[in-house]
Amino acid sequence: MNKTITVLPGDGIGLEVVNAATAVLDKTGELYGHQFEYQFADIGGTSIDKNGTPLPQATIDTCLKSDGVLLGAVGGPKWDNLPGSERPEKGLLGIRKALNLFANLRPVTGHKSLTDSSTLRKEVVDNVDLMIVRELTGGLYFGEPQERREVDGEEAAVDTLQYKKSEIERIVRQAFELAKVRRKKLTSVDKANVLESSRLWRETAEEISEDYPEVELDHVLVDNAAMQLIRDPKQFDVIVTENMFGDILSDEASMLTGSLGMLPSASIGSEVPGLYEPVHGSAPDIAGEGKANPLAAIASSAMMLKYSFGMHEEAAAIDRAVSTVLTDGHRTGDIAKEGETILSTDDMLEKVLEALK
Ligand SMILES: NC(=O)c1ccc[n+]([C@@H]2O[C@H](COP(=O)([O-])OP(=O)(O)OC[C@H]3O[C@@H](n4cnc5c(N)ncnc54)[C@H](O)[C@@H]3O)[C@@H](O)[C@H]2O)c1
Ligand SMILES: CC(C)[C@H](C(=O)O)[C@@H](O)C(=O)O
Ligand SMILES: [Mg+2]
């Protein structure tokens, strides 16, 4: 197969990790007889510097013309003092909205050989396998108004948490579909004891559940969910939740795998192309030093093969290669224990390429 992939390196370690991901895609293509062609486009802070905007129309057009999008990360201290509407992060939110990528799948997969470096007890996290389904184009991130105003004679700020029923329906349905082919357990996470949007969310999830009698649905309040993820993560199969709760819970859950540098994601909508990106950010503290763990980006490229191109065998080969390098004890700094040899981003990539068969 021939596939065109738009690559959006973005900022900080974004470029370092997408380079690793495309190298793995190329090797996979060689092994399985596929040709991946890349078109690079600007996003985030580097795009602000170059084009005066974090998301040029040309980037959206390029993405729309491709079969899949691979993104590194956006943001960094250089742009931190810009007004909210001009920040690098607006580019990321903009591309998610422009491609209508309402479902963000964040699998949390524990590798047995890594749990020693986890701060959590081994028996709690060994082989953890859950999927966070985060709603990605609604909620607080996009609600209007989002503004400063005067309240009681002083400065105030407003963000709006709004969900239309149809937005809840489609993400919950997506989560049920995933749960149906996994362990058939769906946990909907909300704050229905306080928020009206959560009460609509919970009612809607109950309604949709009638179409999925084989899947067990339960509801957990978000504060409890945050605690349960640490106490007993293996009780979860699929978690579905609104945009900001999903953002926070997925960073928390990443530590069950040992590092934020391990967590991939797929952002998908009803139309192609999907966008694939590691869950982590631009990591300004290590950017440019060759220290970034490329495994989240590499695993994100495997998700692209699976979800956008239907290349299941090829995706499994990449996941296996990642498992092999971990089992063989290869470690970047974020997942190394004291005394272990620390590999650079490029060295880790080499290990994955060697393991890819
Ligand atoms: N998807 C994205 O583009 C995305 C996601 C999160 C944060 N951000 C942006 O990134 C910038 C920095 O945010 P932050 O510091 O809060 O979060 P971050 O995810 O960039 O970094 C948090 C910590 O994790 C470490 N880390 C992250 N990825 C790593 C990797 N692959 N290998 C090794 N260590 C890794 C970093 O070194 C840092 O110590 C901000 O501008 C933020 O808005 C972007
Ligand atoms: C950078 C930021 C806008 C983004 C988000 O909150 O969605 C990031 O944290 C993520 O998890 O992808
Ligand atoms: Mg986040």
Image (cartoon, rainbow, N blue to C red):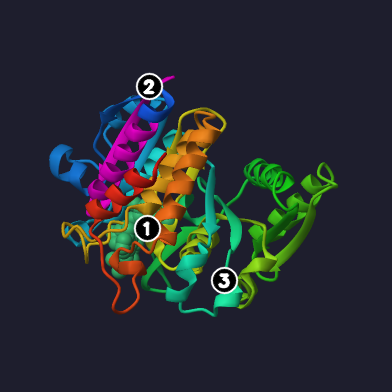
Tell me the CA gap for discs 3 and 1: 20 Å
**Residue 210 in the figure: left or right of residue 341:** right
Q: Position of residue 334 (x, y in %)?
A: 33, 68
Residue lying farthest to the top in this orientation: 2
Q: Amino acid at mark 1?
A: His
> Which marked residue is nearer to the observer: mark 1 or mark 2?
1
Of marks 1 and 2, which one's residue comes earlier in the chain? 2
Q: Which residue is mark 2?
A: 65
Tell me the CA gap for discs 3 and 2: 41 Å
Of marks 3 and 2, which one's residue comes earlier in the chain? 2
Q: Amino acid at mark 3?
A: Val
Q: To which quarter of the image does residue 228 belong? A: bottom right
Q: To which quarter of the image does residue 197 belong? A: bottom right
Is residue 146 shown to the viewer in this render? no
Towards the viewer: 278 or 211? 278
Q: Is mark 1 within 8 Å of ligand 1?
A: yes
Q: Which residue is mark 1?
A: 280
Q: To which quarter of the image does residue 318 belong? A: top left
Q: In the rendered view, would you say 135 is above or below 286?
A: above
**Local SS, label 2:** loop
Q: Does the residue at mark 1 contact the one at mark 2 (Cβ under 8 Å)? A: no
Find the magenta span and give its range. 1-28
Q: How many marks?
A: 3
**Local SS, label 3:** helix
Asked whether residue 211 is drawn in magenta, I would say: no
Q: Does the residue at mark 3 contact the one at mark 2 (Cβ under 8 Å)? A: no
**Residue 324 in the figure: left or right of residue 199:** left
Q: Position of residue 110 (x, y in %)?
A: 53, 62
Q: Amino acid at mark 2?
A: Lys
